Amino acid sequence: MSRVGKLPIAIPSGVTITIEPSEITVAGSKGTLKQFTMPDITVTQEGTELIVSRANDEPKIRAKHGLMRALINNMVTGVTTGFSKKLEINGVGYRVAAQGANLKLNLGFSHDVIFSVPAGVTTAIDQNTITVTGISKQQVGQVAAEIRALKKPEPYKGKGIKYEGERIIRKSGKSGKDK
């Protein structure tokens, strides 16, 4: 049995879960999330816990067992506490500013880059740090990855957009001497 899939999901107070044959809806204080159910995976509610089980031990179904449990657990976490990712902008003249619901980034190009933030995700700016928050773990990660892709950190000076705590492996440069 899947080590992740066999773990029960604790349902905190204030979270309501609706289980239908085709989808699962999780509603909490921060919002509502929906996830379609996978074939041969059943989700049952027993008291204050959700149990995810599978029909048989076929490899494709076993692979989906832990995935379905992780997706539901992320939905429960998202509607109670939410998710966030921080991005740091490093480089001389590199900066970010809020422009309504969009982000205006100066990244060393001949023009400013305007990034439109999708609905369901909010951004906060503090100096050269962007905090992306939302209730969907997938959407928060996707928006953070799209912002990082605008100017990935380069290995020589470390300029660009990186995740907070990300380690950039530096190269020494043309001459081969260490700096």
Image: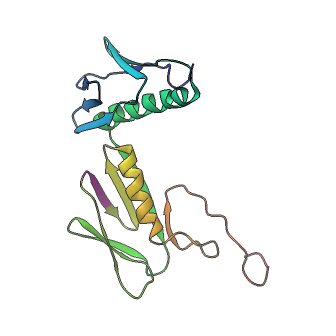
Residue at the spot 35% in from the left edge and 63% down from the top edge? 126
Task: State whether the magenta stretch is mostly helix, strand or loop.
Answer: strand
What percent of the width, then of the height, locates residue 43?
Answer: 37, 20
Question: Toward which corner of the image does residue 78 lie, by quadrant?
Answer: top left
Query: Looking at the image, which is closer to me, 42 or 83?
Result: 42
Q: Is residue 132 magenta?
A: no
Q: Is residue 121 magenta?
A: yes
Quadrant where the C terminus is found in the figure: bottom right
Question: Toward which corner of the image does residue 119 lie, by quadrant?
Answer: bottom left
Read off the magenta span. Answer: 120-124
What percent of the width, then of the height, locates residue 112?
Answer: 35, 81
Residue at the spot 41% in from the left edge and 65% down from the top edge? 147
Which residue appears farthest toward the bottom when viewing the image?
A: 110
Query: Looking at the image, which is closer to me, 13 or 114?
Result: 114
Residue at the spot 79% in from the left edge and 79% down from the top edge? 177
Which residue appears farthest toward the top when viewing the image?
A: 47
Report the number of discs.
0
What percent of the width, then of the height, locates residue 143?
Answer: 38, 57
Residue at the spot 26% in from the left edge and 31% down from the top edge? 25
Query: Looking at the image, which is closer to me, 148 or 2?
Result: 2
Which residue appears farthest toward the right when viewing the image?
A: 176
Residue 31 versus residue 19 in the image, above or below:
below
